Image (cartoon, helix red, strand yellow):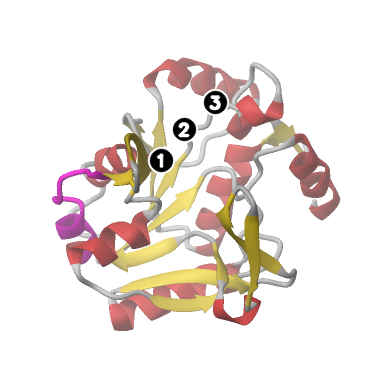
Amino acid sequence: MNAVIIVAGGKGLRMGGDIPKQFLPIGGKPVLMHTIDRFLQFDVSMQVVLVLPESQQDYWRTLCDEYHFSQPYILANGGETRFHSVKNGLAKVSSAATLIGVHDGVRPFVSNETIQAAYDAAALTEAAVPVVNVVETIRYIVNDNESKTVPRSAYRLVQTPQVFSASLLRAAYEQPYVKECLAGSPQAVAEVFTDDASVVEKYGHPVTLVSGNRENIKITTPFDLVIASALL
């Protein structure tokens, strides 16, 4: 059995409004409903665990009633960080699951091919992450006054779902959550666990890269909503 943890904890600050981005409507229903539909259209038997902040759950239930959304899912509480949210979601995943994906709730355009590739690769290597090529020139910021071009062929843009064997993901999330101090500034800290792949890598297991799909955008800004409407 396969499972997916869909993490939707955004506050919508970059949207400039009061409604969290995962609840904004596109194509006649909220973004998050499109995302859940994608996985159940891919595999009707997939277990879906939806992670939402407790403060947003009543509003989500209201939306489900309003849009007559009755897809099966299990609800888990969001945590202080994405790391803690995924860990909460893991606690709700069935022990029968052999592969577990983790997906951003605001990526409603992941393709069946991307989902298939990630789960297939994880079945072989235990850890798979979809990526796409960088198509624009990128620069590395050395400091406030200096930057330099770096070869874009050496970089990839990371997407979700990131898929892992259930045993590996559960073990990796038993690690303590950590941050690291930025050089020269003990007050400034950076996230060590920026995504699930980073948690698994910290645990000591490499990840396999598979091809994502360019349409699998993460909706975070008003411009992204325009693109999403066009894609629909």
The kind of residue on which mark 1 rests is Tyr
Numbered circle sitting on residue 9: 2
Question: What secondary structure is marked by label 1?
Answer: loop
| Region in magenta | 168-179
- Mark 2: which secondary structure? loop
In the image, taking residue 76 as reference, residue 224 lies left or right, namely right
Left or right, residue 129 beside residue 191 = right
- For label 2, the crowd category at 10 Å Cα-Cα, with few meaning under 14, some 14 to 19 and many 20 or more, is many
Q: How far across and how far down the image is residue 211, in percent?
A: 57, 77
Please name whichever residue, 45 or 100, is drawn nearer the observer in this view of the structure.
100
Q: Residue at x 42, y 16 (%)?
A: 55
Work out which residue is located at the far front of the displayed protein and give it. Answer: 145
Please say if the residues under marks 2 and 3 sit with CB atoms less than 8 Å apart.
Answer: yes
For residue 138, what is the image quadrant? bottom right
C-alpha separation, residue under disc 1 versus residue under disc 3: 22 Å
Type of amino acid at the residue the image marks with label 3: Lys
State the image coordinates of residue 86 (x, y, percent, origin top left).
32, 44
Q: CA distance from mark 2 to mark 3?
A: 7 Å
Q: Residue 153 or 35: which is nearer the viewer?
A: 153
Mark 1, residue position: 73
- Mark 3 is surrounded, within 10 Å at the Cα level, by few (under 14), some (14 to 19) or many (20 or more) other residues, namely some
Residue annotated with mark 3: 11
Q: Nearer the viewer, mark 1 or mark 3?
A: 3
Residue 198 point in image, percent of width and height: 33, 60
Above or below, 212 relative to 47? below
